[in-house]
Amino acid sequence: MLTFVALTANAQYYTTLNREAAIRLFNRPMERREIILPTIDGYTLYKADFHTHTIYSDGDVTPRQRVREAWYDGLDIVAITDHLEIRTYEKFMLKVLAPYNRTSEPFKYEHAGIANKKDKNTPVLANLNAAYDEAVYYTQRENLPIMVVRGTEIWRNTKSVGEFNALFLKDINVICHPDLFESFRRIKEQGGLIMHNHPGYTRTTTEIAEGDQARAYREGWIDGVEAVNSTTLYPDIIGRCVEKKLFIAANTDAHKPTSHDWPANGEFFRTMTFVMAKECSEEAIKEALKECRTIGYSGNHLVGEHRYLSAFINAAVTCRVICQSEKQCTYSFTNNCSIPFMLRYKNNVYKLEPFKTLSFSFKKQSLPTFVVENMWHIDEQHPQVTLSIDK
Ligand SMILES: [Zn+2]
């Protein structure tokens, strides 16, 4: 009780002092961009980024900043996927911590991991779960309603093998192994999923490379592929995902703060994957990814299977007949979601902005059918969609 009284008195004292000495010019509460999306077949579309980095590998920000900005940016789910092998900031951290090294040995940075070309068996000395733990600690402390996914990025020769994100892990420390397929086995043992990242990175083709990459696909280790990484679309990946039943992902692969590429007052939201799930639990999101119920979003483009793109625009846009004569029919189209649609009818393209209505006339016999130019499905095609009338 005494302690309580003392603390209260102190708080009073500083408030009074502040009032006399300083004038607060404005308050800046936390502010989130809300992204309104339709529901499809009873599924909510959760907004996820399955690929981000922090200072615990080669990113520029702390894990707590990753989850804070994810919330600002309107996400429901963010995966922290620091590299196993590329851990640029560790040497700086170790320099800062050097005074803690009480041995008489001269301080030496031990490269953590198998990117060490001299000795591929050098063990990782860091606790690879630390970034995830810090992110979760922060979301709990600040009551941020956002799911953090424990993940990691596995790096191999980008031209011949590629990079892979392991998602929904239980312990990242045991994933590190010089043999890629031993790492894969340990990911699956933990119930994790494997995503093939930026398939065209440092390559001139997105075709599956012979060798370990081909083996990874052939043996069924891969669960999903990034059709979009940051702002780059790999259109061929959509067909691969549909053919092989893999989830289509779009992720930032953020190393810098996301406000660098996607400012809060900008035209676009950050790149993200819409996941169609019954609820935002780890189990439900994993189930949705295994069933490939995803749509990729980047720069107001939507990437996915025709059936989901068609369902998305039909659920988002209300189409009504507002008048009809013998010769023509006039429709109104109201966009009830945060994503615009570029609707091509014959030679004209109409931009249906979020939360706005367009109206125009068609010949009496024609249904309201458009090519949606900011949607991409297989073979670099934009889907042709007929909107259902008077919902
Ligand atoms: Zn990455």
Image: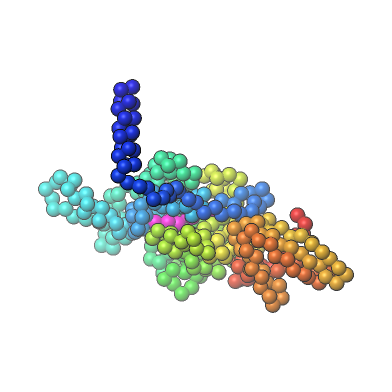
Q: Position of residue 52 (x, y in %)?
A: 42, 56
- Which color scheme is applied? rainbow
Q: Residue at x 33, y 55 (%)?
A: 55
Dividing the picture into quarters, in which one does residue 341 lie? bottom right
Residue sitting farthest toward the bottom: 347
Horizontal side, residue 363 vs residue 382: left or right: right
Horizontal side, residue 109 vs residue 133: left or right: left
Dividing the picture into quarters, in which one does residue 54 lie? bottom left
Residue 51 part of the magenta-drawn span: yes
Task: Assign the C terminus to one quadrant of the image.
Answer: bottom right
Residue sitting farthest toward the left: 104
- Residue 5 visible in the displayed image: yes
The image shows residue 70, relative to residue 372, as above or below, that is: above
Q: Position of residue 159 (x, y in %)?
A: 41, 69
Q: Position of residue 281 (x, y in %)?
A: 54, 43
Q: Residue at x 71, y 72 (%)?
A: 345
Q: Residue at x 42, y 42 (%)?
A: 142
Residue 336 part of the magenta-drawn span: no
The image shows residue 295, relative to residue 365, as above or below, that is: above
Horizontal side, residue 85 vs residue 29: left or right: left
The answer to which of 211 and 17 lies nearer the viewer is 17
The answer to which of 220 and 339 lies nearer the viewer is 339
Task: Assign the N terminus to one quadrant of the image.
Answer: top left
Q: Position of residue 293 (x, y in %)?
A: 60, 54
Q: Give, as a single range, the part of the protein colored magenta.
A: 47-53
- Residue 163 visible in the displayed image: no
Counting every numbered tag in the picture gives: 0
The answer to which of 307 and 123 lies nearer the viewer is 307
Q: Residue at x 71, y 58 (%)?
A: 318
